[in-house]
Amino acid sequence: MAGYIIKRLLSAIPVLLGISIIVFVIMAMIPGDPATAILGSYATPENVEKLNRDLGLDQPMIQRYFIWLGNMLHGDFGRSFSLNRAVLDEVLERFNATLVLAGTAFVICSLLGVAAGVISAARQFGLADKLITFVVLLGISIPSFFLGMMMILIFAVDLRWFPVSGMWPIYGDRDFTALIRHLTLPAIALAVVAAGVIARLSRSAMLEVLRQDFIRTARAKGVHERSVIWRHALRAAMVTIIPVLGIQAGFVLSGAVYIEIVFQWPGVGRMLVDAILTRDILLVQGGVVIVAACYVMFNIVVDVAQSLLDPRIKT
Amino acid sequence: MSGFFKLLARNRLALGGLIVMVAVVLLSLLTPLLPLANPDVIDTANRFKLPLEGTALLGTDHLGRDLLSRLLWGTRLSLAVGFVAAAVAATLGATIGIVAGFYGGKTDNIIMRGVDMLMAFPYILLALAIVAALGPGLMNALIAVSAVNIPFFARNIRGVTVGIAHKEFVDAARLSGMGDLRIIATEVLPNVIPVIVIAISTTVGWMILETAGLSFLGLGSQPPQADLGSMLGEARSALITNPNTSIIPGAMILIIVMAINLLGDGVRDALDPRLKSGALSRPMPATRVDRKAPIPTASDDALLALRDLHTQFHVKGRVYKAVGGVDLSVRPGECLGIIGESGSGKSVTALSVMGLVASPPGVITGGAVYYQGQDLVGAPYETLRRLRGDSVAYIFQDPQATLHPLYTIGDQLIEAVRVHHPKGKAEARAHAIDLLKSVRIPNAEDRINSYPHELSGGMRQRVGIAMALANDPEVIIADEPTTALDVTVQAQILSLLDDLRRERGLAIIFITHDFGVVAQLCDRVAVMYAGRIVEEGPTEAILNTAAHPYTARLMACVPELGGGRRRLAAIPGLPPGVDQLGIGCAFADRCDKVQPACRAADIPLAPLRPGQKVRCIHPEPARPEAVA
């Protein structure tokens, strides 16, 4: 197992390099003089000169890439000109808030999605199946930002069950209950779309598995139907469902940007949008690389989970 | 093509989606012709008017602009951007996928590496990075959204292309001197188009959502031009005071995307061959029972007795009579063989006993199965479940598929015990080891921790037998348990079953198409043809003096070691389809002794000699020399 984890970690290196190349290429598409373009409205002569020196912008592309890569490996992601702060510090601080939001949403959408898919498949063509199918269709069709806005209207403004926005109360203690109260609406709004996708795929994975011969064997053994569904069938279906969870994690992590805007959540997505609008390119670049790298790492966790679940995978 | 539309029309939800989509598209095409107010004229005196208040039908926004007009123009823009993004992503993605899949090798490797890298990004993050570089704007948002969807198309279409690129017709085209471009255009493209259509139909909704999302963030369409997303984004600041300005564009996005998704599901169902047959339905815990005729009574003291059992498959209005009135019985310690060709209904008969026929499409339409005098066919599910595995156990063919691949054989054995007899884990485990030993699995203590894929076919089959024995059942139904095995293993397993029968007084129903196996193990044999028993009697009598022409012909097909220069006579023709059985003898069309009377009326299973029954009006005479 340890060997497999190391192998997967090593295989992440080319992916991470690939990500850095893609980000670098995208940023190289910026038209005009790089330093001026990167600095945008902060392009004072001193800043331009400093950036040229830091990034080696007077040098050819290939060299610039390696300078940039080397700097990143030393933890130097440059300086945000709009915030006048090191990019890494800002991103890490914001990323914490995003992880709380996206992590909660991911747990919600995984549990809800898989459960809904299993129930839907077990009651195929029944009332529960039709109901779930309809709710799922609604879930995957509604823009998460619109859903979030409607949830604010209903649950925060009308019913006053939850605060309208933010991560912490403006006055009062920053304790766990306060966080949960602030987290509930945005986490659910963020989870809904992914939960719908997971439920759909879980349903079809379960239907596929329920037709297999080993399910008939379990029934022939006299296993309770509940156990046939939730133990035998779900265990086999998880092999198909887990990679989907991995993909959905990416949607939740990056889709958090909408929810962070709607709910004024101090996360990395909102930071990126602000950075794009103020043309703070270095902040965008650093944020994108760090979030993408975390997602790559998360996918290794998914692969390891998959190998634990399926003994047929050679570890 | 007309079949495609028919399928689509049959799906009412998809049709609903199609109608809504057509309406929305028509409306947005007609928008410039409609007598609408100018969507960009600011009238701050009339801001935040509610629908029907004042002149504007849907009210006005925070700048006093006509909401209906803005909604229709915004819809037009959103749809246009969404469809263009989908078209661009599909074209570029398909091209990349076809090139990678068609050329393979290094080209494929390099392209797919790049695609994998792009897919390693969280989707929206990549779009944000692209917009960051190009700057906010609707065109740039369109580029970003189509760019992040290209990998999805490329990967899907590459997969299909790889499959096609090695097909014979592509090789033939190559040999005939066609150029690569022409082969791609004439041979590959027509075959990948359905996949492209499915991929578009499942992603265009996403793309509309994503562009709306970027506009919502202020990174897409820039004022005063507005798509649905930026309308929502602008309205957000007045969400609490004037929710209707948010609800109107938001609901429009929801309606459009929902209609597209419904339509997309319909398109996928109509185009995907796997779904076309409607095969993706789950079998219920027990076979559906729908008995119209009176239920036959238990007639003798047999342990297990099937009485006039009818099991059918109802598929798309056709009725397949897999089992058409079967009577069978076994006593304790007896072994009954059921023999017949594939498709003769022997497995369905066996599975009907415990309600294990997959349903849908299976239905038990008549008859009864008496176990110790209790009718199992009409029994409630819980009664059936208690008997399954505990009193009546199954051994299935092909243990590769019939054992759960992700649980150890130990776990599966322990479960079989504990589901009927509450025992401690350790005790159940010890019992499981004993079971493995009783089927002569070496190193049972170690083997118990193996997964099915770690065992050989013969070992897996023994595990299947051990599992059937777990609760010391009264009856074992073995459905071709040795068919997948080689001859030596087969012999071992047969003698194992025979020993168990003698030691434990098991009743065995043994299903096979192999006369050798029957001769070795069975006391009595029933021969099945087209869902009915055509002959039944003691094994010896059937083997020596087969009375039904079908049995006689079936045995003439069996080669014999040292059998001399006897001609192996295949039976001409095929068994009749069980969805179109006529009256009279089902074997009539293949029988060389057929008379008009054979097809005139139903032929009963009548006693011929002591213990031997046959469903034939011209039974073969007793000819002991025939099998000498």
Image: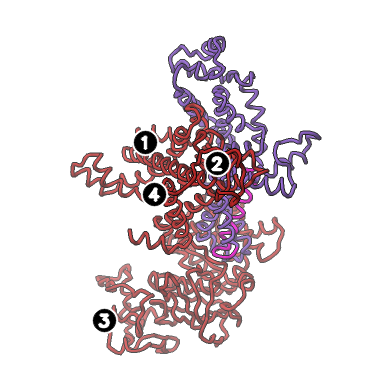
Chain colours: A purple, B red
Q: Are marks 2 and 1 in contact (CB under 8 Å)?
A: no
Question: Which of B606 and A57 lies nearest the eye of the viewer?
Answer: A57
Q: Label 2: few (<14), some or many (≥20) within 10 Å? A: many
The subunit carrying tag 3 is B
Q: Is residue A109 magenta?
A: yes
Distance in Å between CA atoms under marks 2 and 3: 89 Å
The residue that mark 2 highlights is B65
Which residue: 55% across, 63% down? Answer: A124
Left or right, B312 with reference to A275: left
What chain is tagged by disc 1? B
Which region of the structure is painted magenta? A105-127
Question: Toward the viewer: B586 or A129?
Answer: A129
Crowding around mark 1 (Cα neighbors within 10 Å: few <14, some 14 to 19, many 20+) is: many
Which residue occupies the foreground of this view, A298 or B534? A298
Which residue bears the numbered disc 4? Answer: B197
Q: Position of residue B471 (x, y in %)?
A: 63, 67
Q: Label 4, secondary structure: give it.
A: helix
Q: Position of residue A258 (x, y in %)?
A: 59, 38
Whether labels 3 and 4 share one chain: yes
**Image location of residue B181, percent across then percent down:** 25, 39
Image quadrant in which the C terminus of chain A is located: top right
Mark 3 is on which residue type?
Answer: Asp
- The first of marks 1 and 4 along the sequence is 1
Residue at image coords 50%, 50%: B256
For mark 1, what is the residue?
Answer: B108
**Residue A278 in the image: above or below residue B48:** above
Query: Disc 3 designates what residue?
Result: B592
- Which chain's residue wears label 4? B
Q: Please tell me which of labels 1 and 3 falls first in the chain.
A: 1
